[in-house]
Amino acid sequence: MIAPAFESLARIAAAQKNFAWSETLFARAIDLNQSIFGQDSTAVAETLRGLATVYLMQQNFAKSESTLLRVLHIYEITSNGDDTLMGIPLGSLCHVYDHWASQTSPPPAMLVL
């Protein structure tokens, strides 16, 4: 399989903070996994989780969230009632929300006259 090689290279690129190249490599791996295993396969979900991490590293919380929600959707379809599979993407989603909340300040209080 060539998709795992793309994923490994994508992780290396992300570690080197070459996010654009990392996203490109993850996109190639996702395309390959979709063509081989189908759009809603666990292989696609695992690759999407890696891409969501790259988005989180860039503090692109909205993209990370939407990607992880897609991962959760795939696991809901493929888990056959095995809730243990849901734990990892749910934990990742909580991690995104924690970071997102710490980066946004509450709106300024409005002065009512």
Image: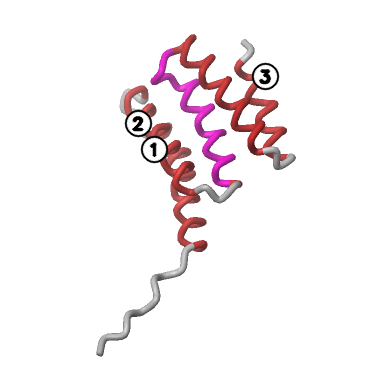
Q: Is residue 32 above or below residue 52?
A: above
| Residue 9, horizontal then vertical, whole percent | 70, 26
Q: Secondary structure at mark 1?
A: helix
| Residue 84, horizontal then vertical, whole percent | 41, 34
Q: Name the residue at 51% across, 28% down.
A: 46
- Please rate how many residues cluster around mark 3, counting C-alpha atoms within 10 Å: few if below 14, some from 14 to 19, many from 20: few
- Is the residue under label 2 in contact with that under label 1 (CB below 8 Å)? yes
The residue under label 1 is 69
| Residue 66, horizontal then vertical, whole percent | 41, 39
Q: Name the residue at 62% across, 10% down.
A: 1
The three-letter code of the residue at mark 2 reads His
- Please rate how many residues cluster around mark 1, counting C-alpha atoms within 10 Å: few if below 14, some from 14 to 19, many from 20: some
State yes or no: residue 42 in magenta.
yes
Residue bounds of the magenta highlight: 38-56
* Quarter of the image where one finds residue 74: top left
Q: Nearer the viewer, residue 39 or 80?
A: 39
The three-letter code of the residue at mark 3 reads Ala
Q: Separation of disc 3 and disc 2 at Cα? A: 25 Å
Q: Name the residue at 39% across, 38% down.
A: 69
Circle number at residue 54:
none
The residue under label 3 is 5
The three-letter code of the residue at mark 1 reads Leu
Circle number at residue 73:
2
Task: Say which label, 3 or 2, has the lower sequence index.
Answer: 3
Q: Secondary structure at mark 2?
A: helix
- Is the residue under label 1 in contact with that under label 3 (CB below 8 Å)? no
Q: Secondary structure at mark 3?
A: helix
* Quarter of the image where one finds residue 113: bottom left
Q: Judge left or right: residue 69 versus residue 26.
A: left
